[in-house]
Image: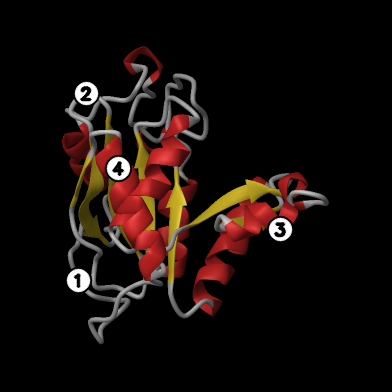
Amino acid sequence: MTEDNRDGEDGDYPQRCSKPLEIIGAVCMSLVGWKVEGEIPRRNKVIIIAAPHTTNWDFVFLLGAAFHLGLSVKWLGKASLFTFPFGWIMRALGGISVDRSKPNGMVEQVADTLSTTPKISLVIPPSGTRNKTEYWKSGFYHIAKTAKVSIVCGYLDYEKKKAGLGPNFFVSESTSGDMDKIRAFYKNKVGKFPALTSRIRLKEEQ
């Protein structure tokens, strides 16, 4: 896990949300009793891990926390979500359509999007589902590696009612070493339904 500055060497930030959204995010998170922690990394482009992911409510709290921090986020969705009549809503909420029928090609699709977008914060839940799984999907890791952008550990801790952004890093040559540090960070983060929390491990580590 390397803390260099391959992207954003000018010390710039990813895309920011509007001031009204920032205020709305702060008010909403305060009303539900949640504390938002962390700072936006000084990088133009980042991939934000969303974990642990155990409920649809994660999306709502994620947006609230992001807006509270002044961050505009993007997320990936299957192409069918972006058709009439709700496609415009999905895009307004930060959705990016991807063709999931080509798993290997999806990494290239997203990496191309990152390389051609000046500023972006892309949120990816590595578990890929709200249910418990034995492995995280490795797409987030390979996208970050291909696009040469940093990964940020985003989290929702329902037990402590805390949400925010943790360490940010570029992937190293050691997948297991990177994942060990990710596991250490999320060790005490509790999802809404702990029993559904996925095991933090990639198949590539076998």
Q: Position of residue 72 (x, y in %)?
A: 42, 63
* Quadrant housing the C terminus: top left
- The image's mark for residue 88 is 3
According to the image, label 4 marks what residue?
29
Query: Splitting the image into 4 quarters, where does residue 200 fall?
Result: top left
**Which residue is located at x 81 percent, y 50 percent?**
85
Q: Which residue is located at x 50 percent, y 30 percent?
A: 56
In this rendering, would 68 be left or right of 76?
left
Tell me if mark 4 has few (under 14), some (14-19) or many (20+) residues whose alpha carbon lies within 10 angstroms of its own.
many
Give whichever of 27, 55 is nearer the camera: 27
Residue with the mark numbered 2:
159
For the point 37% across and 17% down, the residue is 193
Q: Could you tell which of marks 2 and 3 lies nearer the N-terminus? A: 3
* Sequence-wise first label, 3 or 1: 1
- For the residues labelled 2 and 1, the Cα–Cα distance comes to 33 Å
Quarter occupied by the N terminus: bottom left
Question: To which residue does mark 1 refer?
Answer: 4
In the displayed orientation, state which residue is furthest to the bottom: 10
Q: In this rendering, which labeled residue sits more in front, label 1 or label 4? A: 4
Give the image's coloring scheme.
secondary structure
Which is closer to the viewer, label 2 or label 1? 2
In this view, 5 is above or below 83:
below
- 6 or 23, which lies in front? 23
Q: CA distance from mark 1 to mark 4?
A: 32 Å
Q: Residue flagged by tag 3: what amino acid is it?
A: Trp
State the separation of the CA atoms marked 3 and 4. Answer: 26 Å
- The answer to whether the residues at label 2 and label 3 have Cβ atoms under 8 Å apart is no
What element does badge 3 sit on? helix
